[in-house]
Image (cartoon, coloured by chain):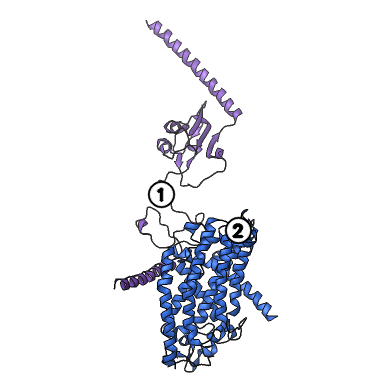
Amino acid sequence: MAFYFISIVLLGFIAVYALMAVWAERKISAWIQDRVGPVVTGKYGLLQTFADIFKMLQKEDITPTLADKKLFLAAPILVFTAVFMGFATIPFSPTYISSSINIGIFYLLAIVSIEVLGILMAGWASNNKYALLGSIRSIAQIISYEIPAALAILAVIMLFQTLNLQEICMQQGILSKQKIYFFGFWEVSKIGGVFAWTIFQAPHLFIAFIIYFIASLAECNRTPFDIPEAESELVAGFHVEYTGFKFGALFLAEYAMMFLVSMIAAVLFFGGWNTPLPNLASFALADYTTGTYWGIVWILLKALSLVLLQVWIRWTFPRYRMDQLMTLCWKVLIPLSFVLVLFSGIWKLFILN
Amino acid sequence: MRKKKNTYLLIKGLFKGLAITLKHFLKPKNRVDKGIQSEDYFSQRTGSSTLRYPADQIPVPEVGRYQLDIEMDDCIVCDLCAKICPVDCIDIEAIKATEDIGKTSDGTTKRLHAAKFSIDMGKCMFCGLCTVVCPTECLVMTSEYDRSFTNPQELNYVFAEMPEAEAAQKRELAAVAEQAKKEAKAAALANSAINKEGQI
């Protein structure tokens, strides 16, 4: 029963989050470009995206005559389902995780790749050259960027010796059963807080985070890696033929995907549901602020801050060219992440022992 | 060595870009419009660029040439504006009055009825010549610039239109008065001719 309840709550949360994220993105982009953004609908234009989604749902659902009807319908469903399934192994608090499986992060990497299949289906079924080009670019990009992302994650999980995301979270705070060292020299198992987060457990893990973050931007098809959608070249990329509800589902999936990769980053690098406040002598702030509800608050704050960072980056940097994109991935990020994996092994063997 | 420097410049550039967007993000969001006449018009760099149009408007200069407007009470129907108009957008029909019909606010006596006074703003080229020649300064250009219509007929602003019956009556009266004047003149001429003959 609780399982169904929580999955429905999660679905509702993601839908509302996606609408608010679209609103926030419009507002932030407007402010960055010295505009004002939506202001008319509701206070500060808060209801603008709700109005947009109602408009979208009322629109005529057009399927191109020459489209592959079944795949055209299946693609948005597959894309959204894949992203939503990813939330199953994300721990929301010390006590709650939908599915505490011991291959958690591995499952997530697989799930994230399924989205590619949906994008390919959408591009192919549309029977439109722009859509097909967009999906081909998307596949090339996402498959390439899986590698540095997976290697950066590997550098982290080599230190924790587990694939279970709940256990990874546990090892970054005061609930840890193992000893935690701040940069390998200061034991912080009882102090916790920001000092116990992954990025402070070893000096190379912040670079691992940056590599993972860049790769996750590419996997979400976000600027500067939005060549699959490249408005100025491909109209809208793989979803150019979609209208109405199906377009809404693809749009929702894009924002849910942003949230999912931010959640993964928060869990792997920023302590997941662990509090950023450390225990300071008699002020046991970390003890006070660790718990089921605090956990949900912290992880959401962390993930949403990362989403904000993604939005900020989108409205700052121009788009990569295809060859530059591949150069960055294969010649810079992948060698660097291999070095990080090696460094993780050395750190685990010689510093933590 | 060169490559190292490039990487450094690249990362520096990325952060510089983020700093620039953050600076704009934190800027105040209200727009301040001082109008073209203010001293620092070209140095207004704060606030957003969006003008929330119906609510906020750019101040227009006092001498701006926008919509034409006429105060019919002050018009003496002299027809000067219609004559100067380069595109003939002013249409006036004047009927002579039998006696003075009043005074304008600057004291000029009105001697003509305006049977018709209309300005077609669809034709108007906004040169403002008509407002220059107007002797009583009743024809002016207002600061209103955002009038629009769905029906092009509405662009023809009708400022005075006398009902046809009244106009006909006025015309008749004017014709009668004219006739009477003519006769008086002819009689006077004849009179003077007789007088002249008598003198000779």
Structural crowding at the residue carrying mark 1, measured as other residues with C-alpha within 10 Å and reported as few (<14), some (14–19) or many (≥20): few
Apparent side of residue A75 relative to residue A311 in the rendered image (left or right) = right
Quadrant the N terminus of chain B occupies:
bottom left
Relative to A331, is B59 above or below? above
User: Is label 2 or label 1 in front?
Assistant: 2
- The spot of residue B96 in percent (x, y) is 51, 26
Secondary structure of the residue carrying numbered label 1: loop
| Colour chosen for chain B | purple
Relative to A59, is A155 above or below? below
User: Residue B87 lies in what quarter of the image?
Assistant: top left
Callout 2 amino acid: Thr
Pointer 2 chain: A
Q: Which residue is mark 1?
A: B61
- The answer to whether residue A318 is seen in the rendering is no
Q: How many marks?
A: 2
Structural crowding at the residue carrying mark 2, measured as other residues with C-alpha within 10 Å and reported as few (<14), some (14–19) or many (≥20): some
Q: Which residue is mark 2?
A: A243
- The spot of residue A18 in percent (x, y) is 57, 69
Between residue A184 and residue B61, name the one nearer to us: A184
Q: Identify the chain drawn in blue.
A: A
Apparent side of residue A175 relative to residue B106 in the rendered image (left or right) = right
